[in-house]
Amino acid sequence: MAPASKAEKKAAVDAAAWMFNVVTSVGIIIVNKALMATYGFSFATTLTGLHFVTTTLMTGVLRMLGYVQPSHLPLSELLKFVVFANFSIVGMNVSLMWNSVGFYQIAKLSMIPVSCLLEVVLDKIRYSRDTKLSIGVVLLGVGVCTVTDVSVNTKGFIAALIAVWSTALQQYYVHYLQRKYSLSSFNLLGHTAPAQAGSLLLVGPFLDYWLTNYRVDQYAYDAYSLMFIILSCTIAVGTNLSQFICIGRFTAVSFQVLGHMKTILVLIMGFFFFGREGLNLHVVLGMVIAVIGMIWYGNASSKPGGKERWSHSLPTSKT
């Protein structure tokens, strides 16, 4: 058998990266839902801090074993990334509390056009007509699936605005930092995870108390809840790593567009595990539209001129 071509190998690695991200993302959603709904552990920000503690330990072990090489990331870049990432986490939690589920989903969908705007303005990316239309089809399909009641208030709108822009900037920065400083996904995680772990564990308990009126230190921990917390932290290592891998190999926009496949899978698994009362014709129609849009986006963006840079590429720096 002839050896696989370079393009075939890249396609195989790309598919593996997407599958890794989809499996870990859907898995952590299911585990966290069980942890919060069944065991009442509603301290989302503190839990995220624990996720990054576990990720920090993983990158530290890999560095000691020699699998992660020393690298350099300027402190100013690290601080900007941590600010964007933490505002994203906090903003999403606050937005979910202050907004209706429908408006929260609309805010999540708006991350795609915001990410597109960042790429157009900062990276001088130009999209073809088919690529733009395919993104619109994905937004339409996911919107039909997930958006129900929509009510807006001032503080909820501000929280959603902060969450959307900080998330888009955080995901843009993942791709930007890996390119500029020639960092692998493990390298970048090794720099950012400790800072996020420390800051989220410092702020998380107070924010969670403000959101839930319960203190994390007074939660009635037992063997089952601890098992789910450990399982959530373990899966989060894969989720964090796969996100950096996917955004590094592609872009934040592609990660957002194709990432909505996770939304479809979560809906399907929710119907399968938790009942079929939400499964109706318009939800199925929305799923079909979204999948068609994702396939169209994959084809359109990979064609010549589908998504291209029209200025000089970003200079890289490697220590």
Image (cartoon, grey):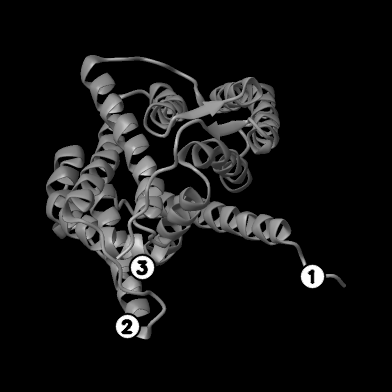
Q: Amino acid at mark 3?
A: Ile
* Mark positioned earlier in the residue sequence (2 or 1): 1
User: Which of 209/82 is in front?
Assistant: 82
Q: Which residue is mark 3?
A: 230
Q: Amino acid at mark 1?
A: Pro
Q: Which residue is mark 2?
A: 64
The residue positioned 73% from the left and 58% from the top of the image is 8
Quadrant of the image occupied by residue 184: bottom left
Residue 217 badge: none
The residue positioned 34% from the left and 51% from the top of the image is 177
User: On the rendered structure, is 176 left or right of 254?
Assistant: left
User: Which of 237/175 is in front?
Assistant: 175
Q: Which residue is mark 1?
A: 3
**What whole-number distance in Å separates the C-alpha atoms at marks 2 and 1?**
35 Å
For label 3, the SS is helix
User: On the rendered structure, is 238 left or right of 128?
Assistant: left
Few, some or many C-alpha atoms within 10 Å of disc 2 (few <14, some 14-19, many ≥20)? few
Q: Nearer the viewer, mark 2 or mark 1?
A: 1
Q: Looking at the image, is 133 positioned above or below residue 196?
A: above
* Mark positioned earlier in the residue sequence (1 or 3): 1
User: Which of 123/130 is in front?
Assistant: 123
Q: Amino acid at mark 2?
A: Met
The residue positioned 58% from the left and 32% from the top of the image is 307
Instruction: Residue 2: tell me if it is visible.
Output: yes
The residue positioned 37% from the left and 48% from the top of the image is 315
Given contact means CB atoms under 8 Å apart, are the residues at marks 1 and 3 in contact? no
